[in-house]
Amino acid sequence: MKITAQQTDRLAAIVFKTAGWLSVVVLLSIFSMLLFNGAKAFRTISPVDFFFGLNWNPAAYGQPKFGILSLIFSTLLVTLGAMLIAVPLGIGTAAYMAVFAPRRVYRLIKPVIELFAGVPSVAVGFAGITVVAPAIAWVFGLNNGLNALNGAFLLALMSLPTIIIVAEEAIRAVPPTFQEASYALGATPQKTLWHVTLPAAMSGILAAVMLGMGRALGETMTVLMATGNASAFPGGFFDSVRTMTATIAIELGETAQGTAHYYVLFAVGAVLFGISLTINIISEKIARRFRYKI
Amino acid sequence: MKETTQSKLEIRNLHLHFGKKEILKGISLHVPDKAITALIGPSGCGKSTLLRSLNRLHDLNPDARLKGNILLDGKSILEKKKDVTDIRRRIGMVFQKPNPFPKTIFENVAYGLKINGLHHTERLRERVEHALRESFLWEEVHDQLDEPALELSGGQQQRLCIARAIAVEPEVLLMDEPCSALDPISTDKIEHLMLRLRERFCIVIVTHNMQQAQRVADFTAFMYLGNLIEHGTTAEIFENPQQELTKNYVSGNFG
Ligand SMILES: Nc1ncnc2c1ncn2[C@@H]1O[C@H](COP(=O)(O)OP(=O)(O)OP(=O)(O)O)[C@@H](O)[C@H]1O
Ligand SMILES: [Mg+2]
């Protein structure tokens, strides 16, 4: 029997539609699994203690503490710190690659960046412990460089390739006629980039930033290795932190099933999931507004 | 027909290569001030390429190589050390497809003024209004200046691009088939506009439309395969061409 082009089209449509729906189903089931198990934690722990507690100390004898705020704050500290470094650097690099880089330079750096995107997080963690942390300790005169700054730095490094690659696409997708119109009015390349190209690429650049942020937010192994994991409420970038992801990774395997501690880790997972989802929805909204307005 | 002889732009034996391919093969042409010069010729003969040499847009293309010279008011504009942004401010351009920025109507016209250092709000408003009035667009858009330019019709967008170009008060206006994407009514409006702008600018227009060339152009230059075949007043070129090629082209015998 011969398969016609029409039949393959129909088959492909079915396959992709199924895959699409399947990912929605998987996503929803993960979220409901987290919610369902997380909710069980509140049979023994008060939601107020969980959502507003500053201390996370599940092992404290007699009075375990399950306050998520220090974990959330740690995650935000490390993630936002990473974005502070990676966003300007990433967009700048992307703009350089898309607009200014001579072909020879471009052919050199593009594959390096792509290669960088594939470095396993364990390897980045290693580099963090052996190179970056001592450097930070030396520069700032600290005993120990395993802190939030170290984590932010490494996460910046890890989200940079994503940001650069996606932002470069976005900048290249700006129709060259916009740039030509700007040049034809006597604008310099820098002014053209700043006032025409980047604004026109804004929705794609936002997408790039959000993807990079998602990568940083969800990253586990690197922060687990490189931030010291002290569970005290961090006071700043020089303090050791323990992110939500690292907490789950460290504690879930060593916790007896069915205990309050076990279930509360699911609740932490649900909160993390909620944060990523919120960021994604907001960014989608912003991106759509930009697409319409500019 | 105007009797202008003062040449604003002078092209001297201009050669242009894209890589190994020679696209312009030694073009020489005098472009007079306060007049409209039309470039005509079959597709691919190099009209756009020539036009884009005049405001050095080929600088953006690393494959492009220019030889020969172009003089603006008697001074070369091709020297590398010449400030290219200043040259482009003096020589404005309107493109084939309307290409307003994805910004508001006001911001589109104000853009060229701002990047050239004008930030005074009141002065900006005046200049924007003036440019829009000159482009016969003010009546249509004065109450929607803060709306996105991309919501205008194609013809309005093209007049906005003309307003944007003339807002910075250039001396020369280059137009590459400015009406080819427009309906007859919009085309008519833009031709009217050109005839009025002719009083103040030196205009060079590329067109495939023989009637348009005859309606608006004082002078016409015919190009073929990268060569300038013939150049003269529009009447001479269309009614009494000296070259066989020109005769065939303007009578529509090839295209
Ligand atoms: N960036 C470029 N790189 C290489 N070749 C080019 C480039 N731009 C144009 N060309 C070539 O130069 C020649 C002239 O092109 P040009 O666009 O100037 O023609 P034209 O007369 O404007 O044609 P049309 O009437 O179709 O617009 C064509 O053969 C084209 O393929
Ligand atoms: Mg052309």
Image (cartoon, grey):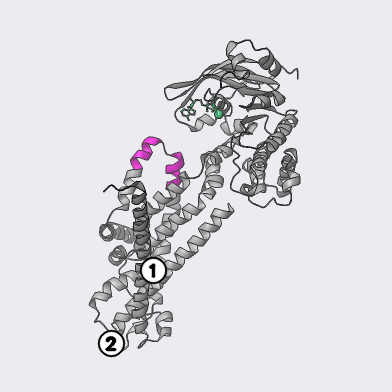
In the image, residue A285 lies at what x, y percent?
A: 52, 62
What's the residue at 30%, 73% (across, down)? Answer: A248
In the image, residue A104 lies at what x, y percent?
A: 36, 35
Q: Amino acid at mark 1?
A: Thr
Q: Which residues are magenta?
A: A92-109
Question: Within the image, what quadrant is residue B49 found in?
Answer: top right
Dot 2: chain letter: A
Looking at the picture, does residue B167 appear above or below residue B59? below
Q: Is any atom of residue A202 visible in this view?
A: yes
Same subunit, labels 1 and 2: the answer reads yes
Q: Amino acid at mark 2?
A: Tyr
**Residue A167 on the magenta span:** no
Q: Residues within 10 Å of mark 2 (few under 14, many from 20)?
A: few
Q: Which residue is mark 1?
A: A75
**Residue A93 on the magenta span:** yes
Secondary structure found at label 1: helix
Q: Mark 2 or mark 1, which is nearer the start of the sequence?
A: 2
Could you tell whether A68 is left or right of A196 in the image? Answer: left
Q: Residues within 10 Å of mark 1 (few under 14, many from 20)?
A: many
Q: Which residue is mark 2?
A: A61
Label total for image = 2
**Of discs 1 and 2, which sits in the foreground?**
1
